Image: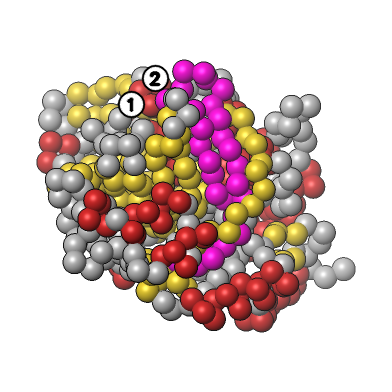
Amino acid sequence: MPSLQTCFRALLCAAALTAAEGPAMLLTAGEVVLGAAYTPEELAQVRTWARTWEGKKIDGSNVDGVAEFLPPSYADLYKNPDKWGARKDGFYFVVAPYRQIFETKNFVAATQQYAPLVKRYPDGRIANYTEIAGRPFPDPKTGLEMAYNFEFNNNGDTAHYTKTTANINPKMGTERPAEQDQWEFYFIHRTERDPKPAYPADQNKSGYHRGYFFHMFKPAEFINTRMYTMRYIDPAKDDDMYMWYAQFRRIRRLSSSQRTDSIDGTDLIYDDEYFWDGQLVRNTYDHQGSKELLCNRHQDLRKASRVFGQAITNNLSMERCKTHVVHAVNKDPNYLYSKRVWYLDPESFIILWTEIYDGNGRFWKCFMQNTNVITTALGEQKHFIVGSQYVDFQRVHSGVNDQQSKVDIQVSVPADPSMFSVRNLQRTF
């Protein structure tokens, strides 16, 4: 029997050949298969379509030709750019060729090891949730299985980046900037750095799933304010959120009920991070088939452009991808949103697009994810979120987030979990 190392070499060679010849399915060393967006037959049709559109600048004059591959609300932006603060160039993007996305070799190995071992309760929940890593459902059939694949994304176990954002009022041509340094740290579902697949119980006595740490620099009234938020493994426990207000030199614990409050006057709530940042079991998930969309999957945001006060970013590179469609409905009848519609990348299970409906069932917001392939500290290639943009169609507001242009994103870097402490919030930086 060949060694695991030999199997990995064969896997990487096969991946390289597949990427060059036209990807279909990424095979692991055994029976577990990580799916691709297209079969060979489907990919041939996409390549034929691309011969007409690849490299073309899409704006209001020709967006109807690709409108079937955009959410209807977004197609309308390009037809009515003046309403959304566009300058003389209007809004535009460029059609790019589809490229398959591959997971790191350690993520593939974890999927190979743990996917066959997944245990489930009768309602579909994973029973051995903390004992596994990788992709629990390599060939998902239900909305819940797809949601678990989304949640098991570990962003390389650790990540560090600088996020610059703007909350935009395109009618007034104004925006409110923000900037923060951010860390992510995962205690379970780890695939890249030891300990794997999880921190042992004696090193994770509080039972954390993951932590975020934020150090804020803008707006001016928040300079040097710091915050961390901790997600528990136990879905019955609310997140812990602590903030150090530098102005008042005080620690404040934020209530979990504030997760649906507007963040600093924006049109975002805390649950909007990653297009869903609450406990998985708080929603029901209904798989609604697939939809081909133009998605921003290989974007260097340093090549994008946006004028001050303009609602969305120009010169994005958009490639066709057949996404999984999942309707996520919160179990709380009083929740702010009546429904989220997720469009999941079938190769990374990042939510590439999401449409959001208000409590009365009316369409409200549309979000688009900017993603790229990042070289990790371990020399791997990792599909990673590098930014996002959203449009509030009821209030005629928007927002953009860029976490790539100012400082290079660091993935799978050494990190100390002690950063998530009140003492660390108060220390002098």
Q: Between marks 1 and 2, how big is the CA–CA gap?
A: 8 Å
**Does residue 113 appear in the picture of this structure?**
yes
As drawn, 175 above or below 235: below
Residue 154 visible in rendering: no
Residue corresponding to mark 1:
261
Which is the main secondary structure of the residues drawn in magenta? Answer: strand
Q: Are marks 1 and 2 in contact (CB under 8 Å)?
A: yes
Residue bearing mark 2: 257
Return the x and y of residue 286 as percentages of the image width and height. Answer: 65, 36
Q: Quadrant of the N terminus?
A: bottom right
Q: Is residue 74 left or right of residue 110?
A: left
How far across and down, in percent of the image, does residue 364 sit?
Answer: 39, 37
Q: Quadrant of residue 395?
A: top left
Position of the C terminus by quadrant? top left
Magenta run includes residue 325: yes
The residue segment tinted magenta is 318-344
**Residue 298: x %, y % from top left:** 46, 67
Residue situated in front as seen by the camera: 97 or 381: 97
Q: Residue at x 36, y 33 (%)?
A: 269
> Is residue 118 depicted above or below 21 in this figure?
above
